[in-house]
Amino acid sequence: MSAVIDKPVKEPGWWEAPPRPAWEEAPSRAGLAGKGLALSLACLAILFPLWIVVVTSLSSRKTIDEAGGLVMVPKDITFIAYKELLSGGQVTRAAIISVLVTLVGTLFSMTVSVLCAYGLSRSGSLGHRWILMMLLATMFFSAGLIPTYLLVQSLGLTDSYLALILPSALSVFNILVLRGFFMGISQELIDSARIDGAGDFRILRQIVMPLSRAVLAVITLFYAVGYWSAWFNASLYLNDQDMMPLQNVMIQLVQKQEAPVGLGQAIKTGQLSGLAVQMAVMVMALLPVAVLSPFIQKHFKKGMLTGAVKG
Amino acid sequence: MSHSTVPRSRAEADMTEKTPVASGGATGSPEKRPSGKLSLWLRFRRDRVLLLMTLPAVVLVLVFNYLPILGNVVAFQDYDPYISDNGIVSMLNSPFVGMENFQRIFEDSAFWNALQNTLVLFSLQLVLFFPIPILLALLINSVVRPRVRAVAQAVLYLPHFFSWVLVIAVFQQIFGGAGILSQLLRQHDYNGLNIMTDPNTFPLLITAQSVWKDAGWGIIVFLAALASVSPDLYEAAAMDGAGRWRRMWHVTLPALRPVIALLLVLRVGDALTVGFEQILLQRDAVGPGAAEVLDTFVWWNGVRNQDFGYAAAAGLIKGVISIGLVLAANKVAHLMGEQGVYKK
């Protein structure tokens, strides 16, 4: 053991375990196998269903019929379901609506949240404790579904995209995370900028925000995922089927087994499997999130925990 | 934007006088704005930009979180949505009926059924869901290879970012009447089964969906607690002859204890809220007998049946009990020496 320690330490490759401290006993083979198995099973439980969804969406009608439903092994890959869905019609429109609502909503939520978080991050400023208390209190109560519904209706937001954005635009938790992060930024930087004559807006834009890129990315993702996944506000406040975002269309397709408007013909004539269409819509719904979140993953812990619970 | 230099420079002068050393060394100390010496007006002038920045958020929260509280008066009304297109006008013109809605609720077996379902689901989540992130976190934490860790975490976090619609759709494809499981059973000459519409197994289905979606995400906070344990403790324990399991028992678990206690307390405080969207999406398939919870009860009676006064009353009951539970839970957290959601 000691002979190993005396040798110059080589940087371990990613496939190797990092050097073990001298006091730690070597892992048993059974222990390693058990751990590996448990972890693989957990990951498989998540990845296997997604695999099936993706593969089925890429399969031809023939393959799907042969498999008697969902396909597990890809045979002849075809993008026909996606082509049909994205060639105009209900799903294309819903996807565009979802993208736009997500973009506009996230931009709005981030702007308001970042401004508010910075405004509350300079402790000792007038009224910041009161405002903070006011925001925090909303984590303890909810006004109730019915009064909120009546209010949104009274404000004339029914059948407008604003109803998808405004009522749930802010997450107090996200504001607190941002505030916690802003409070941790070195005071000298802000002081020196102030001496140079920068106002608060400028300090926020040129000093605080560039230093907070990691947490801004995480919170942006949280908001964006929120807008992208939302269906309930749309089902409450929108009556016009043509205005529905992707998630709501997906409910109709998958749960009620309806064919999307405009695609019925392609399915009837046998070119396209209805199942592939459903799966393709699901892939469209999961793709942006699945692609984006791993990149921001390394910041999650910091974003989640920095100042999340601070009065 | 012109900004007033007088009060600010005075504040800054204060700062540098008081804490010349601290401002030199400490990073991460928040800007302290001394308040005692300045008049309210001067403080307002100094901080008006900051106040302006918080304004949009304050307005949004006032309108969409505080204003609707007033709307709870419909719980005491025989609210008639057809008086006007505008909810507020209708509210002002609807007759008050006192506690009548509440009386109706307490005599309604559907309400008690919903309450019972809520509590059953909550208990199941507590027993079957709650421990899983802890076990997963211990597992991940014991994996030493960084690449394996990163990949496992990326996979485990993923479903948290999926919408409930998607999660339920995925479950439908696996466990539904036409799903993979049914196919396999039929191929082997068993009867196909449809777990998605079975009221008897519905609570387990809901819990399984929650586990699939969020158990992986739940490990973050435990991993953070584990990362903050000093390696010296492990070394000292090992020197004293503690093996792998004893180190886990005497070092790792005590480190997790505060987090576990806090999350447990907060979860109990939130007991009446179990997966509204998730259950609403499956309510029709399973039927209200098994799938109705308090939140969906409110939705059904109000939004669907337009019985707004009745639904608002049910929502109010739930809201009041929930606030009580959350405050009590926070109190318990404080008593246990934890921070809770807010500081004392």
Image (tube, grey):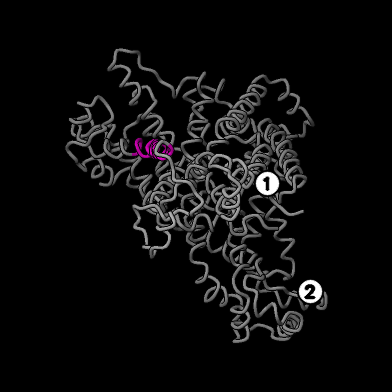
Structural distance between the alpha carbons of marks 2 and 1: 34 Å
- Magenta span of residues: A31-50
Q: Which of the two residues, A297 or B255, is positioned nearer the viewer here?
A: B255
Q: Position of residue A285 (x, y in %)?
A: 38, 44
Residue located 34% across and 31% down the image: A258
The answer to whether residue A87 is visible is: yes
Q: Is residue A38 magenta?
A: yes
Q: Position of residue B204 (x, y in %)?
A: 51, 26
- Earlier in the chain: of badge 2 and badge 1, it is 2
Q: Amino acid at mark 1?
A: Pro
- Which residue, given by chain and number where applicable, does mark 2 sit on? B35
In the rendered view, would you say B81 is above or below B256? above
- The label number, if any, that marks residue A72 in the structure image: none
In which quadrant of the rendered view does residue B316 lie?
top right
- Label 2 neighbourhood size at 10 Å, few (<14), some (14-19), many (20+)? some
The answer to whether residue B297 is visible is: no
Residue located 27% across and 27% down the image: A69
**Marked residue chain, label 2:** B
- Which residue, given by chain and number where applicable, does mark 1 sit on? B68
Q: Position of residue A67 (x, y in %)?
A: 23, 26
Name the side, left or right, on which B168 lies relative to A108.
Answer: left
